[in-house]
Image (spheres, rainbow, N blue to C red):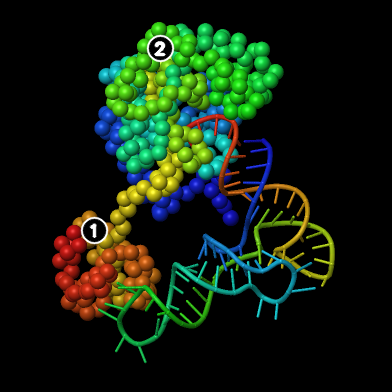
Amino acid sequence: MYRAPRGTRDILPQEQPYWRYVEQKATEICRLYGYERIDLPMFEDSQLFTRGVGEGTDIIEKEMYVFEDRGGNSLALRPEGTASVCRAYLEHGMHNRPQPVKLYYIGPAFRYERPQAGRYRQHGHFGCEAIGDADPALDAEVIDMAWQFFVSLGLGRFTIVLDSIGCRECRPAYLTVLKEHYSPHIDEVCADCKVRFEKNPMRLLDCRSPQCQTIADTAPKSIGYLCMECIEHYAEVKRYLSSLEIPFEENPRLVRGFDYYTRTVFEVQPQEGGSQSSLGGGGRYDLLVEELGGKPAPGIGFATGIERIILGLQQENIPVPILPGPQLFIAHLGDKAKDTALKLATDLRHNDISVIMATGGRSLKAQLRQANNLNIPKVAIIGDDEVKAGTVVLRDMATSQQETVPLEKLPELLG
RNA sequence: GUGGGUGUUGCCUAGCGGUUAAGGCGCCAGGUUGUGGCCCUGGAGAUCGAGGGUUCGAAUCCCUCCACUCACCCCA
């Protein structure tokens, strides 16, 4: 028997209310903040991600679904959305639109990882990006947006963690200092850190291996080596956040898993419970558009994992709206009645009434049982008598009351 | 990639060396005429994750593999 591939799953009807709820909250927040929806391809030229996200990252090195199509092109299922949005920004000349361009997307992302609670190989992403403005007020607005999103969902137990990791000007000097701190101890650190030291020294900081803790704890922090502009930018972001009364926690070791980040980085972390350390995250990427071959344009954005949000909703017992089911079930007895029933179902649907008609030639008893099991509030019963009289018996399933009504009165009785 | 846990019908579970693998939920049907839910009766549905081994005999013991799951790593 076939099964869904490892790390993928079916989102069954009973779970749909959660997805609809999250999507509805996401689109609502985006509407309020003036973000427009963009739908992006699920696969791209794999180079877009290797150049954008960065070659030294886990996502590119071991988690990307790369494949060659029949034309010999190297493509990759998107592991995240930011690179694609930047590509679209360039491809469609969006620098000619009023800046910043504000876009959001909802859809799956793919990473080849060992699945576990809240982690899938295909997972739902909601993200938004503002490209074309370096104003720290925009950083604050994006963080505010993430905050308001989680608040509007009803989630209570989460924290915003904030850091600044410098820019093209100050990062090189910082990395030099960081490497100087590590080089006397390079034999003591874990195997991963030895690689990080060479390929991606920023990542040394968020190693959690016990043998690296002391050295990571005592390592110089990026915020101590920011240039004047980055210091000011970071101070402004924090000032705006404070005036918006967004609580945040600074963590000088927050690094994030993508190479494109500059200056502001942040993460939304659950305070407890779930083993996954992040509900969402984002940051500024002032060099990415340029790195992808465009005229320089700063950007900032964030992305969230929908499965993890839903997990949080379920853990916190947050009720979500139920989705409406059919309003009417049509039961019938006899061939003529069946003809009438089929036509009635169609007429009612034209009047925007959701109808299920019995099929399969079952007894009336069985048809009513089915209506009951489907939780449909009203049943129209049509037999030979009703066909002759041009009526139906309309039964209320909750009260067991029923009355005979003319066919043509049904739309107004149900509408 | 590394480690732990678990695999018996659509779902939950019993059985842990000896008849046709049992029960609950759900599904389907019946309990006289055209009426659901409660109750009663019946039915369908399981190559006991797969392969191999031990044994007169394996769902049950052993080995291998696979899947699921949780955690690490990393991330949404």
Examine the rendering and report whether any part of residue A11 can be seen.
yes
The quadrant of the rendering that contains the C terminus of chain A is bottom left
Q: Residue A307 placed where, x, y %?
A: 45, 42
Residue drawn at the location 35% of the way across and 20% of the way down: A238
Circle 2: residue type: Cys
Q: Dot 1 lies on which element?
A: loop
What's the chain of the residue with tag 1? Answer: A
> Residue drawn 57% across and 36% down?
A113
Q: Residue A21 in the image: x percent, y percent?
A: 34, 45
Given residues A409 and A212, the one toward you in this image is A212
Real-space Cα separation, disc 1 to disc 2, in angstroms = 59 Å
Label whose residue precedes the other's in the sequence (1 or 2): 2
The kind of residue tagged 1 is Ile
Answer few, some or many: residues within 10 Å of disc 1's Cα (few below 14, many 20 plus, some between 14 and 19): some
In the image, A238: left or right of A408?
A: right
What residue is rendered at 31% in x and 50% in y? Answer: A321
Whether discs 1 and 2 lie on one chain: the answer is: yes
Q: Which residue is mark 1?
A: A353
Where is A239 relative to A267, above or below?
Answer: above
> Going 49% across and 24% down the picture, which residue do you hit?
A254
Task: Judge from the rendering whether residue A412 lies leftward or rightward of residue A201; answer left or right.
Answer: left
In this rendering, would A90 be left or right of A388? right
- Residue A47 at what x, y percent from top left? 52, 23
Q: Quadrant of the N terminus of chain A?
A: bottom right
The mark lying in front, picked from 1 and 2, is 2
* Residue nearer the viewer, A68 or A233: A233
The percent coordinates of residue A322 (x first, y second) are 32, 53
Q: Which residue is mark 2?
A: A230
